[in-house]
Image: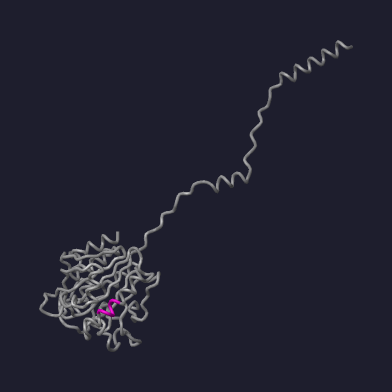
């Protein structure tokens, strides 16, 4: 019996030794370990979108380049920003120049009366393209843009001429929006004193200097902003050579002798907002110094 027991034990040992060993899978990663790995993964930075361009236009009155620079405040603005010394108005009196700046045509108008024109112009373009805009008129009252009294002047507000009605975008100067959500395009027409039409150039220059300071220090002024200060026409005997001063948020400065005119200004604005050019702006040379500063 003892012999049989030893044989049985030996057989059992041999069977255990010959049984294949099963592989054991490594334990799965814990939920905590997975969360840590996810949290520490490198995340590619998201590119910050470029802000849309923002354009401001201020239109002054009846002052040639030489006389304007005799004003210490205007001369200071010209030194601080870019002065275009070969910029010309395109007609006389005021109204044809305002129409040229906003539609690319004087419409063969040679007076300052009211003329209902086709529904065209820069304002119509901006609205159709979904670009926010406002035209701020100093002196405009609750009587509206067609009947407001002095110092407002309808002849210096071109927008009601197109389509024969006052757009809702034309508002009193007191509502000027310089917040971070300001319109993409802002037009400003001073009243008949602050534009130098009826008051001394120095008085108008002081008002202008204060307004420019407000704009360039506001939240509306961002990295792709430009401000144009244009004069509608000269004061006689100056070949309609008028100042154009341009400020950009990237520090444009110095004097530029390239020939430009009101059609160039319109072409530049339309190029900034990718709008089709109107009238004479189609063949005008845009103000490339400004366009480069906005890239």
Please state if 117 lies on the left or on the right of 21 as rendered.
left
Please state if 202 lies on the left or on the right of 127 as rendered.
left
Residue 211 sits in which quadrant?
Answer: bottom left
- For image coordinates 34% across by 76% down, the residue present is 169
Q: Position of residue 102 (x, y in %)?
A: 24, 73
Against 48, residue 30 (above or below) is above
- For image coordinates 62% across by 40% down, the residue present is 29
Q: Which residue, as the protein is rendered here, is positioned at the far bottom?
A: 149
Q: Quadrant of the C terminus?
A: bottom left
Say if the magenta span includes residue 177. Answer: no
Q: Nearer the viewer, residue 137 or 224?
A: 224
Q: Quadrant of the N terminus?
A: top right
- Report the label total: 0
Against 285, residue 37 (above or below) is above
Q: Position of residue 134 (x, y in %)?
A: 33, 75
Against 147, residue 294 (above or below) is above
Residue 10 sits in which quadrant?
Answer: top right
- Magenta stretch secondary structure, dominant: helix
The stretch in magenta equals: 205-209
- For image coordinates 22% across by 74% down, the residue present is 75
Q: Position of residue 288 (x, y in %)?
A: 22, 61
């Amino acid at each position: 019996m003892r012999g049989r027991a030893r044989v049985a034990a030996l057989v059992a040992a041999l069977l255990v030794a010959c049984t294949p060993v099963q592989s054991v899978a490594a334990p799965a990663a814990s939920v905590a370990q997975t969360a840590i790995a996810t949290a520490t993964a490198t995340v590619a930075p998201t590119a910050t979108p470029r802000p849309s361009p923002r354009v401001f236009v201020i239109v002054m009155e009846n002052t040639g380049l030489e006389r304007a620079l005799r004003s210490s405040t205007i001369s200071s603005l010209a030194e601080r920003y870019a002065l275009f010394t070969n910029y010309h108005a395109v007609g006389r009196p005021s109204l044809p120049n305002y129409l040229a700046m906003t539609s690319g045509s004087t419409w063969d108008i040679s007076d300052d009366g009211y003329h209902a024109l086709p529904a065209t112009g820069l304002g119509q373009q901006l609205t159709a393209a979904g670009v926010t805009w406002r035209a701020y008129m100093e002196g405009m009252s609750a009587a509206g843009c067609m009947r407001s009294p002095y110092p407002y002047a309808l002849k210096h507000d071109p927008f009601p001429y197109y389509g024969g009605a006052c757009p809702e975008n034309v508002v009193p100067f007191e509502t000027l929006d310089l917040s971070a959500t300001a319109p993409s395009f802002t037009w400003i027409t001073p009243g008949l004193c602050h534009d130098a039409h009826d008051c001394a150039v120095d008085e108008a220059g002081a008002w202008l200097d204060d307004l420019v300071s407000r704009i360039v220090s506001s939240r509306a002024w961002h990295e792709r902003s430009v401000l144009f200060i244009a004069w509608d026409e000269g004061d006689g005997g100056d070949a309609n050579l008028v100042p154009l001063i341009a400020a950009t948020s990237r520090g444009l400065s110095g004097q530029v002798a390239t020939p430009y005119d009101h059609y160039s200004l319109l072409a530049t604005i339309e190029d900034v907002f990718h709008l089709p050019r109107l009238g004479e702006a189609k063949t005008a040379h845009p103000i490339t110094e400004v366009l480069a500063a906005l890239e």
